[in-house]
Amino acid sequence: MTHDTTASTPLSPQWGKKHMRGDMETSAGTSLPVSSYSGYSLHARTPEDGINLILSQPGLSCSRVTRLSPTTVWALPEAGAELPPRDRPLRLLLEGHGSTIGPLLGETLWSDPRRSDAPIGIQLLGVSREQGQQILSLLDAATRQGHAQPAVSPLPVEESLVEPERIRSILKSVCVMQHQGTLRQLGRTLRVSLEYFDVEGSLLHWRREEPDAEWGAAPYDIEVVGYNSAYRMRVPALETRGERMVTPLPRRLWQVRHRWHRRVPAPTGLRARFHHPLWAELGVREREAVDLSFSGLCLLSPAEDLVFPGLLLRSIEVCGEDGEPILLRGEVRYVSDKSPDGQRVCGIQVSPCSPQDEARWVELVSRALCPTTRGGEQYPEQLWELLVDSGYFNLAGRTSEHFEELRAHFLELSQRAARLPRLFCQTVWPSERGVEATLSSVRPYRHGWLVHQLAKRPGKPEAPQVPGQILRDIHVRTLEHAQADPDFRWLVAYAESTVPLMERVHLAFARAHAAKGEALVMPVRLMQVSCDEESGLPADGLQLGPARFEEKSLLAEHIALHRPACYVDALDFSRERLELREVRETWNAAGLERERHVLVARRDDVPLAAIVLELGHPGTNLFRLLDTARLFPLAPEGREAYVALLDEARRWYAQWGRSSFVLVREDEDDSYAAAARLRDEPGAQPCLWLLSARLLPEFLEHVSEATVGRLPPRQQRTA
């Protein structure tokens, strides 16, 4: 396989890193609406199959083109060829597949006279619409022959799965969720579905969805679709009868994860409007949306739109369900081959143009991804009723009356959450009974989203659902929301290990990945601390006060030494993020409270221990999991200062109007609990749960598999 040589070429001082950030620029400083790596990568096997660059000055030289778009050409010059000048425009021709394009004007972007095998980069200037159409037609021909591919298209990730229980879990999920499959043979495909999974016999019962077709000769390559992956298997046929076929359980599955963000079909009638940034004479282009994700939009686009990979669309207008326009900016990432009706699929990476556009785009995409769910801002009172009816308030031995002081804050924040998608997600699953279930997430840290407040109404709604659908849907919407945050690196939760769902869905998965540092399950004690119940004990010669600069550095060093790296990164305990400065500014700009304060206990000016105090906006978490404190010893006798530090913490939280806070105890030392008047729920076994963003696609696959419930009887599936 040949590779695009420009992708690994070091930058020279004459080019500079500004071209890696987005728009290209000419020597005159004019911005061009294309990304640095635009167009198509060319990898012809013979000179006759390739495209050549011919320079007419100085002298005549010919170079093999390695990347091409209507704005940029990269080429490998002939051995001994003189490099083009940098100080004046170039005249050039493009030749290939029996046609010649030009003359074209350009200027040198990059060249390296020190290396004979280095490519040259040329920015094309003033390319007319007709010339652009000729270039794209030339690239179409090369693509059809397998000699060109979009320069920015990533290859899917493929993994071989051989563990029998994992294979069974995946195929069980596919069967229960009734996902469609494809049977592939040389020159044709058939649509199939996994109708029944005989677990005891390890047999798969398939149904052909095209009655007039034939099964053909075995063995078969079958692809089925999970949450965000396709799974391939090769199986023989044990029995075929009419539209049904029985195959054995495969010994191996090949998993292909297509995208970081899941795509789904666009809502019916959704259209997008844009202007071509290079050729204004094309006018407004209005095109039907095919599918979408938080970061992507696919449009039907005929060849006359003249779009190509790397083209930057500075304003794309999409109309939401209420008819109001949503403005996006985008980069074309993919253009498909032409279909028989002349249409192409154009894949665009998009981002909203303003916070208002972002909130409305997130809501539009969330509804398309999980049409059964809604944002909590539409159901604030019903959401509170769900928390009462589900028994959520009875956790940790509480009653609903205990939470009344937070009710007004909770309802107000629920209505604001949808307008702040970079900070909040509140998911509900509505039905004719009201709100069936809820799950929320909030971003209290620079790179970490806290998943919290899971509740489900007892019983079932009248409308039939696939087993486990409610829990699966609220997890998918909430976690995919965090995935849309470009700064997202960690999921954070406090999971109760005695709850079977938490153990099966969250904790077991994290433990399986903890050894690689991509997950953490840390037992903790969540101790309730009332601000009006001080210990009454003297400080015993301790000096208490805000941490000094050098003490913050000492604390960060201690945490880095005694806690896993994922803990430090997810909870912002590195020295540069210890004060939560950037997070606090983001929350405060939205009119919300978010603070972190470090207190230190000293004796004779020597630091003994520190307590890290965090504060969140009232009503964000009803169990006050954003009003948390953590104790850390800074000297061997540091625990002697814990009671005094907790008393000082009580005063700090009281100044902020809090009646209580939560001590997240990460040690097993009970020696100070009684003196400090700490309480927790007997029998509770909470854990701090961390999961890397890199594992989120796999975790969502796991959630899909772990919540499907039991396989239905065979007769139910064939009725």
Image (spheres, grey):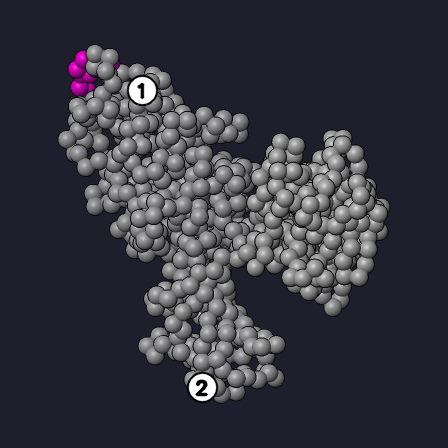
Q: Which mark is residue 551?
A: 1
- Could you tell me the amino acid type at mark 1? Glu
Farthest front residue in view: 80
Residues drawn in magenta: 536-543
- Answer whether residue 499 is visible to the viewer in this image: yes
Residue 688, given in percent of the width and then of the height, sits at 31, 42
Instruction: Label 1, secondary structure: give it.
Output: helix
Residue 432, given in percent of the width and then of the height, sits at 50, 57
Q: CA distance from mark 1 to mark 2?
A: 73 Å
Q: Residue at x 31, y 48 (%)?
A: 515
Residue 496, given in percent of the width and then of the height, sits at 29, 47
Residue 313 located left or right of residue 103 = left
Main SS of residues in magenta: loop
Residue 391 located left or right of residue 84 = left
Q: Residues within 10 Å of mark 2 (few under 14, many from 20)?
A: few
> 315 or 621, which lies in front?
315
- Answer whether residue 530 is visible to the viewer in this image: no
Farthest left residue in view: 671
If you read the primary sequence from the N terminus, does the residue marked by circle 1 or circle 2 appear first?
2
Q: Residues within 10 Å of mark 1 (few under 14, many from 20)?
A: some
Q: Does 695 appear above or below 588?
A: below
Q: Residue at x 34, y 48 (%)?
A: 516
Residue 591, given in percent of the width and then of the height, sits at 51, 27
Residue 339 located left or right of residue 184 = right
Residue under circle 2? 239
Farthest bottom residue in view: 241
> 108 or 279, which lies in front?
108
Q: Quadrant of residue 661?
A: top left
